[in-house]
């Protein structure tokens, strides 16, 4: 069934224009999503340590790979490559999502197998950073003379230099990487923050059911869902490899093709899309999602309006998203 933007708007919300339509839309959007705010966290020793660790390429098996090596400022904390090389010279199994706004999620990575940013960071030591064990990573931190910074960040700990505190420091830094956008200004009462096309896209996004999965302040990131309940996803994405999703780890049939729903903050800047980076353009990703998730075919107007709304989720790259003492490299 082909769905036009006009049909969606008239059927579900009625024809309205100007400021009179903004308040009901704002109330509904606030209930479904909610705003994010710029981080007000002070430059704590914990966050400053996390910043140094995040950007330090020396802290890896090859001495060339950092956490930041898969999360570029120019890509709004993501990676424009479909897959990212790790410290062992291999490619990651899935696309690297953005680290911006990520710490509020109840689970991380495409399979939702890391329960916090600290858990993710600690696991990366023997993952993408390539160390044979966490003990080997600790030895490297000692060699790099990080012990005083760990003592300053975690003065109450009997053993400040630990992989647990490494994860905590990384999480503290990443918690400062929030990116409020035009959408948040609209939710806060600024009618002019969104264009009329963006408001139409927001209405269509809600009415067509996108918000069933992409909800909350980050418009996603909180649930696990099957990718392709209406249609096999690879028929739309052109994926070269069919990823079984969580089934590959759990072997439970109900987990086949199940992934964590990605958040949509800054989505217009974080191409390519999906777990395998198989779709390069946002308009194509919108069409694919409507087809495989909702069983709908969108016309060009509907796609353009939804894309325009998604562009309103783009915030500024945080000024501290760079090595200590530097500015973001765009």
Image: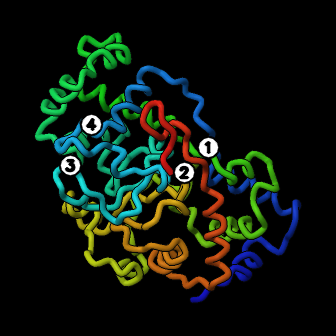
Q: Nearer the viewer, mark 2 or mark 3?
A: 3
Badge 2: how crowded within 10 Å, few (<14), some, or many (20+)?
many
Q: Secondary structure at mark 4?
A: helix
Left or right of 58 on screen, residue 308: right
Badge 1: how crowded within 10 Å, few (<14), some, or many (20+)?
some
- Which residue corresponds to the image point at 13% horizontal and 32% vertical from the top-left? 136
**Quick one: quadrant of the N terminus?**
bottom right
Q: Nearer the viewer, mark 1 or mark 3?
A: 3
Please tell me which of labels 1 and 3 falls first in the chain: 1
Q: Determine which of the numbered discs, if any, sits on residue 87 in the image.
A: 3
In the rendered view, tell whether residue 201 sits above or below residue 2: above
Please tell me which of labels 4 and 2 falls first in the chain: 4
Left or right of 36 on screen, residue 107: left
Q: Quadrant of residue 233?
A: bottom left
The residue indicated by pointer 2 is 218
Compute the Cα span from label 4 to label 2: 24 Å
Q: Nearer the viewer, mark 4 or mark 2?
A: 4
The residue indicated by pointer 1 is 36
Please tell me which of labels 1 and 4 falls first in the chain: 1
Q: Secondary structure at mark 2?
A: loop
State the image coordinates of residue 229 (x, y, percent, origin top left).
Answer: 40, 75
Q: Secondary structure at mark 1?
A: loop
Question: Visible in this render: residue 141?
Answer: yes
The residue indicated by pointer 4 is 122
Q: State if disc 1 and disc 2 touch (CB < 8 Å).
A: yes
In the rendered view, tell whether residue 67 sits above or below residue 191: above
């Amino acid at each position: 069934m082909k769905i036009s933007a006009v049909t969606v708007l008239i059927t579900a919300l009625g024809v309205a224009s100007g400021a009179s339509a903004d308040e009901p839309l704002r109330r509904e959007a606030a209930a479904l999503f909610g705003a994010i705010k710029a981080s007000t966290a002070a430059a704590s020793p914990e966050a400053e340590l996390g910043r140094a660790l995040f950007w330090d390429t020396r802290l890896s098996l090859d001495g060339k790979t950092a956490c930041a090596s898969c999360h570029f400022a120019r890509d709004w904390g993501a990676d424009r490559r479909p897959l990212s090389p790790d410290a062992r010279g291999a490619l990651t199994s899935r696309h690297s999502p953005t680290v911006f706004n990520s710490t509020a999620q109840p689970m991380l990575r495409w399979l939702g197998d890391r329960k916090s940013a600290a858990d993710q960071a600690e696991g990366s030591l023997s993952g993408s950073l390539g160390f044979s064990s966490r003990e080997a990573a600790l030895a490297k931190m000692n060699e790099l003379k990080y012990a005083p910074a760990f003592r300053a960040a975690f003065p109450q700990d009997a053993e400040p230099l630990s992989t647990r505190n490494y994860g905590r420091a990384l999480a503290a830094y990443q918690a400062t990487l929030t990116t409020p956008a035009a959408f948040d200004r609209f939710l806060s009462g600024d009618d002019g923050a969104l264009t009329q096309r963006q408001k139409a896209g927001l209405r269509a996004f809600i009415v067509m059911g996108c918000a069933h999965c992409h909800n909350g302040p980050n418009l996603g990131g909180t649930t696990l869902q099957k990718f392709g309940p209406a249609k096999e996803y690879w028929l739309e994405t052109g994926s070269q490899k069919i990823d079984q999703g969580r089934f590959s780890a759990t072997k439970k049939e109900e987990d086949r093709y199940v992934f964590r729903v990605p958040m949509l903050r800054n989505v217009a800047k974080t191409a390519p899309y999906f777990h395998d980076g198989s779709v390069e353009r946002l308009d194509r990703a919108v069409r694919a999602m409507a087809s495989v998730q909702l069983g709908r075919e969108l016309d060009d107007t509907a796609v353009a309006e939804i894309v325009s709304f998604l562009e309103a989720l783009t915030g500024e790259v945080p000024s501290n998203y760079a090595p200590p003492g530097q500015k973001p490299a765009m």
